[in-house]
Each structure stands twice: as structure tokens, then as C-alpha cells.
Image (spheres, helix red, strand yellow):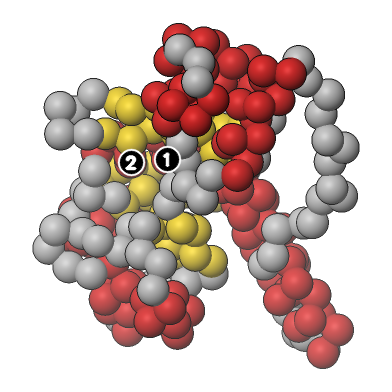
Amino acid sequence: MIRTLVVDDDFRVAGIHAARLAKVEGFECVGEVYTAAAAREAINRLHPDLLLLDVHLPDENGISLLRSLHATGAQIDCIIITAARDLATVRSAMSSGAVYYLVKPFSFDQLRAQLEAYRRWREELESSSTADQATVDSLYNLRRPATQPPARAPRLQPTMQKVFDAVRAAQQPIGAADIADQLGVSRPTAQRYLGALERKNLIALELSYGSTGRPINSYTIK
């Protein structure tokens, strides 16, 4: 099992990541922490193989944490999970040794694909003692998620198709209220079709939290 520590400043989001991780074969969540200081303590105590690491932590930048861990010789891999989209942060993550960078919000399928790619890469790395160029090329390729053939366009009832098209056209996760406004239907109707599309595994539910602390459902294309 690949022992994984989740590091995120929001305990609710950390819980979501941990629950998703538990659904991926070969991975075990050994803890959830919410600060860089707590991450250091947990790493020393739990010796995880992998970090799911947020950038914006209350006491230290996550990439700074990653650099300091590697500077002390810690043998730990890291997938960055963050809302930061600027290329400077992406470059810093890459140069600091992150094996991948996932931009929030992301679907469970995106996370699973990257974790599975990481697992294949790790298994291949551990099975080789020396490497020729072909082995090196294979190891770098294994860090990328396997590509899937394009799926056939689903045949849907007309209103459901309009809801699906609205989610697909959105530049970010979209909720039932926005769908209702776009299509001129009631919010419960929009929510009913969104729920049906999620059950068909055509869209993914993303949870965010507003100022009230209650979860807000929004949806994105898979």
C-alpha cells in the first residue's frame, strides 16, 4: 500500500481528498493535517510515501515545505493539489520535485487517473536497479495518466441534453441555480437533471463551502 498524507488548510476539503483516496486501489490515507507544522510532525511520525499537498497553508507555502523536506533528505513524493493557476507556482512546484500538479476543483476521475499513473511509475521504479535510455523514457511516460479513447456522445432526453451541454460549456464548476437561469427552468428541475447526469457518470459533483460552512453543490464535466 502507498501510504499517503493529505495536507490541506481546509479540513472539509482534506476529508474529501482522503475519502476519494480510499477508493483507489493500492493507496492508504494515513492522516489528514491542515498546517505545514502539523505536516512535518506527521511525516516524522507516520513516514508516508506520498503527500497530497496544498500550496496555500496558514503557516507556510506548501512548495516551501516540499523544498525543505527534500533539503533534509526526506524520501517522499508529492502531488500538489491547489487552486493556484499561475505559471510561476507551477514552475516552482515542478522544480521542487512535485511529481504532478492538480488544479482545484478536479474530479475524482482526474485524481484517480493521476494516482494510478503514480502507482505504475513507482512500481516500475522499484523493480529496476539500473536504467538505459528506454527505461528512463518509460519511467517519464508512466508519470502521465493513461489516455482514454474519446467517449461516444451520450443520447439523452432533450432537457437533460441541454443541462449536460450547459455543464460542458461552463468554464468552471456550475450549480443548479445558474443552470436554471440559463435554461429558463426551475432550480429543482435543474438539480434533478444534474443528479441524473451524475448517476450516469457523465458529470462530476464538486463540493465547495461558502461563508455559512454548508456545502455548495456544483458540477463539472468528466
Q: Name the residue under label 2.
A: 14
Whole-percent x and y of residue 131? 77, 85
21 shown above or below 122: above
**Is the residue under label 2 in contact with that under label 1 (CB below 8 Å)?**
yes
| Residue appearing at x 26%, y 34% in the figure | 209
Q: What element carries label 1?
A: helix
Query: Taking the image as drawn, is residue 45 in sight?
Result: no
Q: Which amino acid does label 2 sit on?
A: Ala
Residue 163 versus residue 79: which sits nearer the camera?
Answer: 163
- The residue positioned 82% from the left and 89% from the top of the image is 132
Report x, y in % for residue 21: 51, 39
User: Which quadrant, please, contains the N terminus?
Assistant: top right
Between 53 and 180, the one nearer to me in the picture: 180
Residue 192: which quarter of the image? Answer: top right
Q: Which residue is drawn at 47% across and 41% down?
A: 173
- Residue ID for mark 1: 17
